[in-house]
Image (tube, helix red, strand yellow):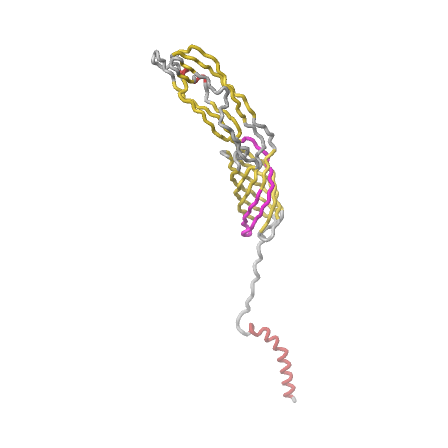
Amino acid sequence: MKKLTLTFCALIALLVVAPAIYADGPEKYSGKEKEVMQPAPPVCDFYRAHEWDLSIWGAYAFGGTTGQNDVPNDDPFFPDEDPFLQDIGTGFFGEPQIFNRNERVNIGQVSNNELFARDNTFGGGVDVKYFWSRYFGVGIEGVGLAAKTNFAGGGLVTLTGRYPFGRFAPYVTGGIGFIDGGSTTYKYFNEKHTYTTLVNPLTGTPSDPAFSVVANEREFWTTDPVANHHIRMLGQIGAGLEFRVTCHIGLMADFTWNFVFGQTDHANKFHLVTLQGTSEIDFFGVPISQFTVINQAFELRPGHGSSNQDFGMARFGVTFSY
């Protein structure tokens, strides 16, 4: 009976202790240390409050006003003749140097765009922004554009709103500032003379240098830019998208429309040019009569202002975030 009782007690003890032994058994008695799993590092926050962003970008810009005016190759003077010298003994016709000057007259505006002096161009810029929250930031932007033979550049204070999700952040932006430079193209009538001195056929010696004559006259037309030399106000609105490659480096692309305004518009004006000379008739190099000749032409004097200077700009660049 005692043996049965002891056996029964031993079985009960074994049933009570076995689960605890089994729970710790494989690791406790295997001689191996227990492997501890490390938690994954937290994913970085791509867009943060109190964030500084530096963006560097290139741009393709196109004017809101485009096209070219067809200014004909006309001689603007009327009558179309210069003061001349006629030698009835030799039959020579020329122009006394003291009675003529080289001519350069603006005859018309060629480019409708009054900022780039062409329809489109390239440029670039940089901006620095501070985001006081994940969604809103203020910044300073600088922009430069390659107007024809003249640089156009300016700066703005900007406000940006964005909506981050994951690595992406669509945004809208706007700003106000200034712009300077740029140009407009005009067509010019040019006349250049090459002079020579007459030889007196009676004495064989050169005549008075005052009676040198035109050996060659060349008329030609050129299209030249006239630079802007006044500051205008610049407004900007736009929208774009940023993609963060890492927590601190991103790619950006956007489109902005830029308004140039604030400068009083002064239209192009025509100015009457009057050239007065003396026409002379000689007999074998000896003056025998003179009379006054007056030639007139209308010259275009470029105006200035902020009209025909609005432009769009597609920008692509990289952003460094800190």
Chief secondary structure of the magenta portion: strand
x then y, percent, for residue 239: 60, 44
Q: Nearer the viewer, residue 277 or 263?
A: 277
Number of numbered markers: 0
Instruction: Indicate whether 90 appears above or below 135.
Output: above
x then y, percent, for residue 156: 58, 39
x then y, percent, for residue 212: 40, 17
Extent of the magenta region: 228-255
Which residue sits at x=42%, y=22%? 217
Instruction: Indicate whether 107 appears above or below 116.
Output: above
Instruction: Indicate whether 275 appears above or below 163.
Output: above
Which residue sits at x=55%, y=37%? 63
Assess whether residue 287 is covered by the magenta stretch: no
Q: Which of 182 and 52 is in front in this view?
A: 182
| Residue 184 visible in the current orientation | no
Instruction: Indicate whether 157 appears above or below 194.
Output: below
x then y, percent, for residue 214: 41, 19
Quadrant in the picture for the N terminus: bottom right
Q: Which of 104 and 258 is in front in this view?
A: 104
Q: Quadrant of residue 17?
A: bottom right
Q: Which of 14 and 270 is in front in this view?
A: 270
| Residue 271 visible in the current orientation | yes
